[in-house]
Image: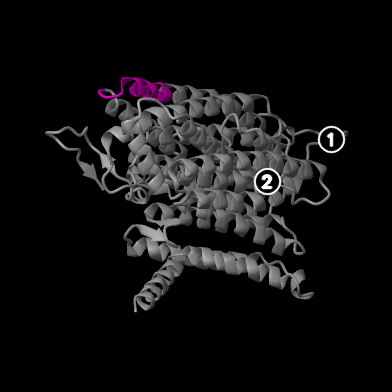
Amino acid sequence: MYLHNWLETLQLNLNDDLLRFAPELVLCFTIVLMLVLRLFRGLNRLHLGSIALCLTVIALGLNWQQWTEGIRPGVMFTGLLAYDNFTLFLRMFLLAFTVLVIWLSMLTGIPDREDSADFYALLLGAIVGMSLMASANHLLMVFIGVEMASLPSYALAGFLKGKRQSSEAALKYVVYGGGASGIMLYGISLLAGKFGTAYLPDVASGFAILLKTSTGLDSILVLGTLFVLVGFAFKISAVPFHFWCPDVFEGASAEVAGFLSVASKGAGLALLARFGLALAGLSSLTPDYDTWLKMAQYLGTAVAVVAAITATFGNLAAYLQTNLKRLLAYSTIAHAGYMMMGLATFTRDGVSAVLFYLIAYLFMNLGAFAVVAFLRNQTGSEDLSSYRGLMHRAPVMAVTLGVFLFSLLGIPPLVGFAAKFQIFWVLFEAGQEYRTDAPGLSFTMYALLVIGAINTVISLVYYIKVMKVIALEKPVEDLGGHAPPPLRLPWSSALYSSLLAAAVFVLGILPNWYPLTEYSQQGVSHFKVIEQKSTPLAPARVGG
């Protein structure tokens, strides 16, 4: 009787979990469908982008339904995955981004008909892995999610056939990724061996107990946590684990580079946020102020230092670049640093600001890579010198690229300004909050704020350099002294870039940046807020 009731409960929970996991199941079905259709001689000549696009939209619709209906935070598959608004937000972000990437690939012709099934199977496989990263509630699922996201990405980076640079980029990506994954797995084994479990809430409880009872730092915990963070830093392309990023972006197609620049960083930042806040106790029902403060002092300071170095290095290295994809690669490294600044606060508002930044980053960074892809098809080059006088040859592309670059810079009223403002504001608030109990951490937050502002000014140089080449320099003349003819871009390409540019502008001028602020705050509603220090007379007030 007991066994029968247990099996019924297990079956009921499994049914609920499968319904919650429905968007990923749709993507898995799409991957299998792509591979099956590849076997038929008649169907393998069709471009399967439309099928992938329609089924991804269905997955997005299922996730949107779960988002609007409202949920009670819980777990899936016996605790391996978390099911909360944070999971739904990242799913929605990744699926919406995938829809735009598939649409872009259909417009640019990469992949072609013959390779479309393989390309979209890899693309959707990477998205499934990134979705697992965002919802991982167990260290084993952390590793599985990172590997499921990384392996298809390696193949996508080298997808251009017969191009030596693309193959070299994929090989570098594999070597760096394999090394980072091995280090992360070793860190997971150290943490699991120390606590006897890999369940993230239990690991967080073990951290809290040791922080209260131990008089010094445990070397095993320090090494284990450091090695796990190495894997996260690789996905985010944070310094010093950024070496793969410029080479991979330059060798891969602009479509793949745009995909990796947004989706990979979004999943990596989500995983870092969930891991860090879980260790700080903000995912538990009764978070402890002292545990949160100590984790913020240790991990928050480490993340802050890496964020400052990453933003500074990315902006300085972009100065010397002449290939636009490589320049944008260093720009993505710098923006990863900005977003890590928000996570360094170890507050719910900090994570909310990062989610806001991710939405803005989706439109402006994908838009920049899309323009590069469209112009590559017309000019056959991605070098900055080929874009001289672009304002005269393709004014729509020149204007939209200017909108994206100025938004990446943070010029108002574009949405990039709103995103950076959110990050800088939470840094200021964190500095105020830590001022009494952790003055050193408070100084770190204020220093990050200053460094972020200085980096914004530094980035002005290379973004303006691109605009100078596009708008002020004359097109390269041929041997006869004749100016090159105007570029005849398809209307669909102009429509795509114009829609993204319009989103960058409209989202930046909405009052209080609604609805982005509302969605980003709803996405972190599962995490707790500790309003004041707990004392015997005045217990901590915890906000949900």
Q: Position of residue 37 (x, y in %)?
A: 71, 72
Q: Is residue 30 above or below residue 258?
A: below
Q: Is residue 64 above or below residue 294?
A: below
Distance in Å between CA atoms under marks 1 and 2 = 27 Å
Q: Quadrant of residue 511?
A: top left
Q: What is the three-letter code of the residue carrying label 2?
A: Ala
Specify start and end residues of the magenta stretch as a single range.
436-449
Q: Position of residue 82 (x, y in %)?
A: 41, 55
Disc assigned to residue 408: none
The secondary structure making up most of the magenta span is helix
Q: Residue at x 35, y 20 (%)?
A: 440
Q: Is residue 440 magenta?
A: yes
Viewer-side label of 1, 2: 2
Q: Nearer the viewer, residue 357 or 16?
A: 16
Q: Position of residue 542 (x, y in %)?
A: 23, 43
Q: Residue at x 31, y 32 (%)?
A: 212
Q: Nearer the viewer, residue 174 or 245?
A: 174
Q: Nearer the viewer, residue 251 or 404?
A: 251
**In the image, 247: left or right of 427?**
right
Q: Closer to the N terminus: mark 1 or mark 2? A: 2
Q: Position of residue 331 (x, y in %)?
A: 58, 33
Q: Secondary structure at mark 1?
A: loop
Whether residue 54 is visible here, answered yes or no, is no
What residue would you read off at disc 1?
Answer: 478
**In the image, 153: left or right of 12?**
right
Q: Nearer the viewer, residue 460 or 215?
A: 215
Whether residue 77 is visible here, answered yes or no, is yes
Q: Is residue 525 magenta?
A: no
Q: Residue at x 29, y 26 (%)?
A: 434
Q: What is the three-letter code of the residue carrying label 1?
A: Asp
What residue would you read off at disc 2?
Answer: 254
